[in-house]
């Protein structure tokens, strides 16, 4: 039996699809207010028998910070994919991210050790990888505090996984780049696609690594099946300028791409306006210093380690964008 956390998120949802398609027995932990129907919708993008596939999942209502529900979720389980996370670049969410990303992962590791789980895969992020200015960023780059609340909580969550490994847990960590995939239009790259579809006047100047969600889950499954543990792997298909990513989306939406550069000065002016908007209208902040830094950073990542160990061929980012935009238009 396989347990998946974060099954109503982009990675967890696509992971569930691949597992049940392969006739694996699967449990999925979900919070009380989470919308599991979105999983069925995503399945429908790929298979006419999506309802039957969805019905193969055993849903367990619970929370990674509720030990009693975890005890039920871990019953008769021998493999775990921990995909659940709180993703935010807003310092207002720091305490919530600490609770879910760090404390929740610590609970998962403790349960995995207690229940003698044979295999454990943790989904982290390239935001938790160190940086370098001299070459491609790889798994060996040294981590440094960066005042990014999300990356810091994911870094400390990884330390919980390494603690589990030191105590005998067979675990592996994956660090995906920006994940491109269908079904989640208010979160992650899906929210960015939604924003582009409404029109953009400015483009960010940064560069980062991108990967199709299908590659992420296939690699996770292969690492577990091949018993490759006590390791972390950057998962990036290609490094793209964010402007090129936007231009590609615009192409499939038949839209004119933005031509104005979002300089640091313009971004910080937007930050001020966003602050005033949040105060006057009592709305959540949309911008943060972390988001601005991410939009300006020129980071290139190496996928050499994962390609060498699995001899893996990635889906082209362009092809992933094309499919995702097509599914967005049919949504």
Image (cartoon, rainbow, N blue to C red):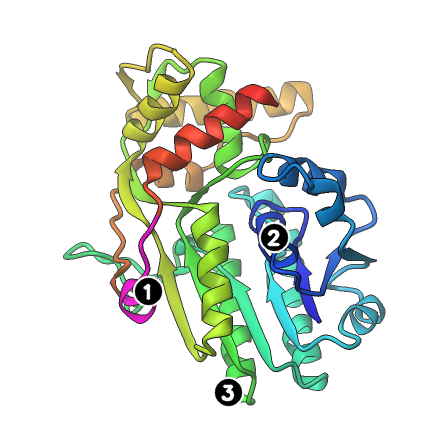
Corner quadrant of residue 71: bottom right
Number of numbered markers: 3
Instruction: Identify the residue under disc 2.
Output: 12
Vertical arrangement, residue 29 with respect to residue 121, above or below: above
User: Quick check: can you spot residue 84?
Assistant: yes
Q: Are marks 1 and 2 in contact (CB under 8 Å)?
A: no
Helix, strand or loop for disc 2: helix
Q: Residue furthest left?
A: 134
Crowd tier of the residue under label 2, counting other residues whose Cα lies within 10 Å: few below 14, some 14–19, many 20 or above? many
Instruction: Identify the residue under disc 3.
Output: 166
Q: Please name the residue shown 62% across and 50% down the image.
A: 17
Q: Please name the residue shown 63% across and 70% down the image.
A: 80
Type of secondary structure dominating the magenta stretch = helix
Corner quadrant of residue 38: top right
Near-viewer residue (86 or 179): 179
Residue 237: x, y in percent? 32, 49
Q: Quadrant of the N terminus?
A: bottom right
User: Quick check: can you spot residue 297?
Assistant: no
Q: Please name the residue shown 85% across and 70% down the image.
A: 68
Q: Is residue 62 left or right of residue 97?
A: right
What are the residue bounds of the magenta stretch?
A: 305-314
Report the disc number at residue 274: none
Mark 3 vs 2, N-terminal side: 2
Q: Quadrant of the C terminus?
A: top right
Residue 289: x, y in percent? 43, 38
Instruction: Identify the residue under disc 1.
Output: 306
Mark 1 vs 3, N-terminal side: 3
């Amino acid at each position: 039996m396989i347990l998946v956390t974060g099954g109503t998120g982009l990675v967890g949802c696509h992971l569930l699809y691949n597992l049940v398609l392969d006739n694996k027995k699967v449990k999925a932990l979900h919070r009380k207010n989470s919308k599991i129907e979105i999983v069925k919708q995503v399945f429908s993008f790929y298979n006419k028998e999506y309802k039957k596939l969805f019905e193969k999942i055993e849903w367990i209502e619970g929370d990674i910070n509720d030990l009693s529900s975890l005890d039920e979720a871990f019953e008769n389980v021998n493999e775990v994919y921990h995909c659940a996370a709180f993703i935010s670049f807003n310092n207002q969410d720091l305490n919530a991210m600490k609770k879910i990303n760090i404390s929740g992962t610590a609970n998962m590791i403790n349960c995995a050790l207690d229940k003698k789980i044979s295999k454990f895969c943790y989904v982290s992020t390239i935001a938790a990888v160190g940086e370098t200015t001299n070459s491609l960023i790889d798994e060996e780059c040294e981590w440094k505090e960066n005042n990014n609340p999300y990356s810091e909580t994911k870094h400390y969550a990884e330390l919980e996984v390494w603690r589990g490994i030191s105590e005998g847990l067979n675990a592996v960590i994956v660090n995906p780049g920006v994940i491109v995939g269908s079904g989640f239009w208010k979160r992650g790259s899906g929210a960015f696609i939604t924003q582009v579809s409404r029109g953009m006047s400015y483009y960010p100047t940064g560069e980062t690594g991108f990967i199709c969600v299908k590659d992420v889950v296939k690699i996770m499954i292969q690492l577990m099946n091949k018993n490759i543990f006590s390791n972390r792997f950057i998962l990036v298909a290609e490094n793209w300028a964010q402007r090129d990513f936007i231009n590609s989306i615009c192409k499939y939406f038949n839209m004119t791409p933005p031509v104005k550069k979002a300089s640091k000065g313009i971004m910080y002016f937007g930050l001020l306006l966003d602050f005033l908007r949040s105060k006057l209208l009592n709305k959540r902040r949309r911008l943060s210093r972390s988001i601005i830094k991410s939009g300006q950073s020129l980071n290139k990542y190496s996928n050499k380690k994962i390609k060498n160990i699995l001899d893996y061929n990635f889906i082209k980012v362009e092809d992933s964008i094309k499919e995702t935009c097509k599914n967005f238009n049919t949504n």
